[in-house]
Amino acid sequence: MTDSFHAGRIPLTVIGGFLGSGKTTLLNRMLQANDGRRQAVLVNDFGAINIDASLVSARGADMISLANGCICCQIGGDLTDALIRVIDSKPKPDAIVIEASGVSDPWRIAQVSLADPALALDGVIVLVDVTSVLAQVADPLLADTVDRQLRAADLLVLNQCDRADAETLAAVRAWFDKHLPDTPRFETRFGEVPVALLGGALSHATRDTAHGPHCAAGCTHTDHDHSHDHAPDHGAQFDTWSFSAPGVFRADALRSLLRAMPPGVMRLKGVVRTDANAWAVLQFAGRHGSLRAWPATMPHPDDATDNTLVAIGLRGQLPTMALEQALRESLRAARGL
Ligand SMILES: Nc1nc2c(ncn2[C@@H]2O[C@H](COP(=O)(O)OP(=O)(O)OP(=O)(O)O)[C@@H](O)[C@H]2O)c(=O)[nH]1
């Protein structure tokens, strides 16, 4: 944003959206499309190991990894410290992008920029997995988290449209027409959004209405001095579990796990070595899983690096023993290769 309101301030964009909706995919597109601006990227993963930090192509950007908890619960803590470091760095970045964890409330993160005169909120972009969102908003255990994310958006990116049939897409459109009729939305796959839409120009035109349901009448979101209701501590709602071990996985064993994931795993992702691809990226979200060779565009992990995986599920529902067993068995099967 270059208008007079933002003069001298660093524009900040927050990317939010539920677990596995496509935030890192969109962030990578934004970074690849970078027009030479100096960008600082803050990446937050809920787990103890920040897998996303390895999956972000931060070439030409300074990246700060924030793991072990969700940053909307760390206002005044790690997030604020990281932002102060970025603001004070020399040369200053031209823009800051924060990828929230999949359980964060992006509006709470965006509020940091409203409170700091060095920052100007450029927009809150919220990714939506169109194949899962209707189930999520209907699930009493997830609805509050997802609803807050959707209502925080200046732009809703209805992602993963390649996976949805026409009926699902029609139902999703009808839901958004009914519940968030004023928030601009863009339907796409793999976070393919025109850069002009991501540049922030969209946000201030829509901000007053986009957050309406959160706010008391008259809130403009540029001078926040009244309090919003606060999301519950996500540490209390979600469990995370990490796995780290040396060795080589059998790719077919990992694929079997992806096809028959133990119930309770909402998200599993990791950086693994397999007998098929050397380094690979494992992803599972909702009902979909993939095991893909390491992207050629990203720096390879060091060969001494351990396999690392992180799982997330609702508190008390994460089947950590079953996961541990399945992963250990897949590793054992590869010994001696
Ligand atoms: N088919 C399909 N897959 C997608 C699309 N967008 C993302 N994916 C895949 O979905 C998985 C999750 O994408 P990410 O970008 O890591 O999602 P995320 O929101 O950053 O995930 P968390 O940070 O764990 O919440 C990856 O395997 C992506 O390649 C899409 O539009 N279509």
Image (cartoon, rainbow, N blue to C red):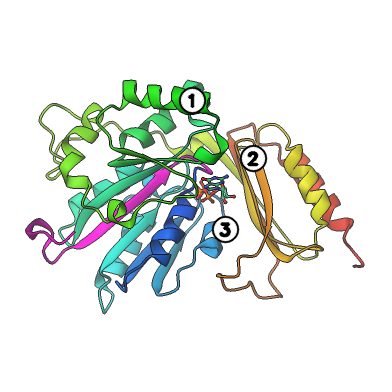
Q: Is mark 1 within 8 Å of ligand 1?
A: no
Q: Earlier in the sequence, mark 3 or mark 1?
A: 3
Kind of residue at badge 1: Leu
Please identify, in this view, whether the residue under mark 3 or under mark 2 is nearer the observer: 2
In the displayed structure, 284 sits above or below 138; it is below
In the displayed structure, 131 sits above or below 204; it is above
Q: Do labels 3 and 1 touch, CB within 8 Å? A: no
Say which residue label 1 marks: 134
Q: Is mark 3 within 8 Å of ligand 1?
A: yes
- Between the residue at mark 3 and the residue at mark 1, the CA separation in whole angstroms equals 27 Å
Q: Do labels 3 and 2 touch, CB within 8 Å? A: no
Q: Residue at x 24, y 53 (%)?
A: 200
Q: Is mark 2 within 8 Å of ligand 1?
A: yes
Say which residue label 3 marks: 51
The local crowd at label 3, few if under 14, some if 14 to 19, many if 20 or more residues have their Cα within 10 Å, is: many
- Between the residue at mark 3 and the residue at mark 2, the CA separation in whole angstroms equals 18 Å
Tell me which corner region of the image, top left, top right, bottom left or bottom right, holds residue 331.
Answer: bottom right
Single out the residue that lies furthest toward the front.
Answer: 166
The answer to whether residue 16 is magenta is yes
Single out the residue that lies furthest toward the bottom.
Answer: 90
Please identify, in this view, whether the residue under mark 3 or under mark 1 is nearer the observer: 1
Tell me which corner region of the image, top left, top right, bottom left or bottom right, holds residue 264.
Answer: top right
Say which residue label 2 marks: 288
Q: Earlier in the sequence, mark 1 or mark 2?
A: 1
Q: Residue at x 90, y 67 (%)?
A: 337
